[in-house]
Structure formats: structure tokens, C-alpha cells
Image: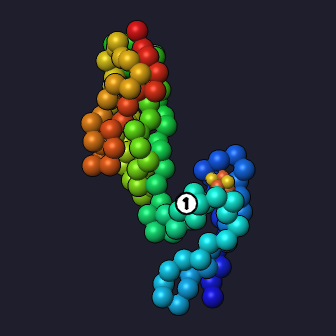
Amino acid sequence: MEKIEMICINCPLGCMLTVERDAEGGFKVSGNTCPRGEKYAVNELTHPVRTLTTTVAIGNREGKYLAVKTAKPISKAKLFEAMALVNATKAQAPVKIGDVIIENMLGEADLVAASDAE
Ligand code: SF4
């Protein structure tokens, strides 16, 4: 039976998880201190997601950038495509934290401001 090891990144404890596939194709997770670890391990093997945190240029403030993040985790497979969109985007100040910069990016989540910009 194949064993996969990974570190849970949901909290600073960083539990070392071991995942085994059972005969029915399900997953048996051990090493987790709480239920979030099991959910994380199964998601990592079936549909890994990440919250994208980055910056976007502010079009009307030369040389200034705005901190942004996805409103929820998006598919890890779409991170490069998402960054291409972010790099082609310019925010317009003023911006308040939580303002939507790209709506429903790649059909996954809004990209929102993570800081204010006057
Ligand atoms: S399994 Fe629970 S306690 Fe361990 S790192 Fe993940 S979230 Fe933290």
C-alpha cells in the first residue's frame, strides 16, 4: 500500500501527516492532531487549493502597489494563470480593504484588496 507523507500547513503546529489509500480508493490519514489535518491531506491529493496573496500595480499612483489576495482558496493548478491576470491588471486608487479588484477571477474567487490605498 502506497504511503504519502506531507506536512499540514493549516496551523503553526505543522503536523506530519501520513496518507494511505485503502482498497476502495479512500484515504486513511494519520499523524493529524485535529480533523482539519485529515481534510487538508485528502484535499491535497484530490483538489489542492491555495489562497493567492500578491500585489497589483496602482494605475494612478506611479510606482505604487496594492496588497491583494483571493477571497477564498483557489485551485493550485490555476495559480500561474491567475498571476498572469493579476500582472495585467491595474487598480485605481482610492481603494479600501476588501474592495474587489478582479471579480470572480477564473471562475474561482474574487481578488480583493488586502490593504487601503489613498
Ligand atoms: S492537523 Fe490540526 S493541529 Fe496539526 S497542523 Fe493541521 S490544523 Fe494544526
Quadrant (top left, top right, bottom left, bottom right) of the N terminus: bottom right
- Residue at (36, 36) in percent of width and height: 111
- Which residue is label 1 attached to? 40
**Dot 1: what SS?**
helix
Quadrant position of residue 59: top left
Question: Residue farthest to the front?
Answer: 34
Q: Which of 66 and 51 is in front in this view?
A: 51
- Residue at (44, 30) in percent of width and height: 68
Quadrant position of residue 93: top left
In the rendered structure, which amino acid carries the disc numbered 1?
Answer: Tyr
Q: Is residue 38 left or right of residue 18?
A: left
Question: Residue farthest to the bottom?
Answer: 23
Q: Nearer the viewer, residue 38 or 109?
A: 38
Residue 26 rendering spot, x and y as whole percentages: 50, 80
Question: 89 above or below 5?
Answer: above
Residue 49 visible in the picture: yes
Residue 52 rendering spot, x and y as whole percentages: 46, 42
Q: Does the residue labelled 1 lie within 8 Å of ligand 1?
A: yes
Residue 100 rendering spot, x and y as whole percentages: 31, 29
Quadrant position of residue 38: bottom right
